[in-house]
């Protein structure tokens, strides 16, 4: 490397390290479960427990998002992903909720993975900021998750 290049990488943030640790614990817990039905039921309980642990504003958003996703796309299975509520199809994450508080951000987000069938043209949104979940926002989320699994 030349002397004129500077590197600002200082490693992972504390929040990122905590998310990776949560992910490892989620994977270990999932591996210990017995039947597929037991795994699915326990994963759904884990998601609800994680939502219940969130601070008030994030919890209210996550509860509404969870209700909309599970009602609108019952094929998606709730599970924890990096310590956050996520929803998978055939074991692959399609969408996830990220709390603002955990990552010390201005707003919570609803993100979609490359598994989501949201492709539209050459560019499309893969994450959405959430500050409140109104009836209109619920309708938008429902339409997005239905499209994501279609």
Image: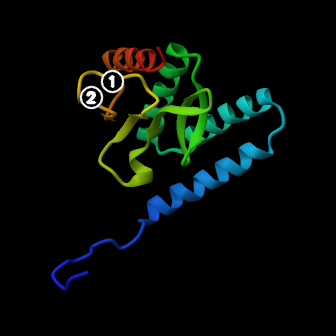
On the image, the x and y values in percent for residue 52 come to 57, 39
Q: Residue at x 55, y 20 (%)?
A: 70
Q: Which mark is residue 32?
A: none
Query: Could you say whether the residue bearing mark 2 is in a helix, strand or loop?
Result: loop
Q: Residue at x 56, y 30 (%)?
A: 88
Q: CA distance from mark 1 to mark 2?
A: 6 Å
Q: Residue at x 41, y 39 (%)?
A: 57
In front of the other: 129 or 147: 147
Task: Kindly indicate the quadrant of the structure image that contains residue 132.
Answer: top left
On the image, the x and y values in percent for residue 55 come to 47, 45
Which residue in the protein does label 2 denote? 124
Q: Is residue 3 left or right of residue 98?
A: left
Q: Is residue 15 left or right of residue 122?
A: right
Using the image, determine if residue 50 lies above or below residue 7.
above
Which residue is farthest left?
Answer: 4
Which residue is farthest bottom?
Answer: 3
Q: Residues within 10 Å of mark 2 (few under 14, many from 20)?
A: few
Task: Kindly indicate the quadrant of the structure image that contains residue 33.
Answer: top right
On the image, the x and y values in percent for residue 22 come to 59, 54
Q: Is residue 32 left or right of residue 128?
A: right
Using the image, determine if residue 6 lies above or below residue 30.
below
Using the image, determine if residue 106 lies above or below residue 48.
below
Q: Quadrant of the N terminus?
A: bottom left
On the image, the x and y values in percent for residue 34 come to 84, 37
Q: Earlier in the sequence, mark 1 or mark 2?
A: 1
Which residue is farthest right?
Answer: 34
In front of the other: 86 or 149: 149
Q: Which mark is residue 119?
A: 1
- How many labels were placed on the picture? 2
Contact between labelled residues 2 and 1, with CB atoms less than 8 Å apart: yes
């Amino acid at each position: 490397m030349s002397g004129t290049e500077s590197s600002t990488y200082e490693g992972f943030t504390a929040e990122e390290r905590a998310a990776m640790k949560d992910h490892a614990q989620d994977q270990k817990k999932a591996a210990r479960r017995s039947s597929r039905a037991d795994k699915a039921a326990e994963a759904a309980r884990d998601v609800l427990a994680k939502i219940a642990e969130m601070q008030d504003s994030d919890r209210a958003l996550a509860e509404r998002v969870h209700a909309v996703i599970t009602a609108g796309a019952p094929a998606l299975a709730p599970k924890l992903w990096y310590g956050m509520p996520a929803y998978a199809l055939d074991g692959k994450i399609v969408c996830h909720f990220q709390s603002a508080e955990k990552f010390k951000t201005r707003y919570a987000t609803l993100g979609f993975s490359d598994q989501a069938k949201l492709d539209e043209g050459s560019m499309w949104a893969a994450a959405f900021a959430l500050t409140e979940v109104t009836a209109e926002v619920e309708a938008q989320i429902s339409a997005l998750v239905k499209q994501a699994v279609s």
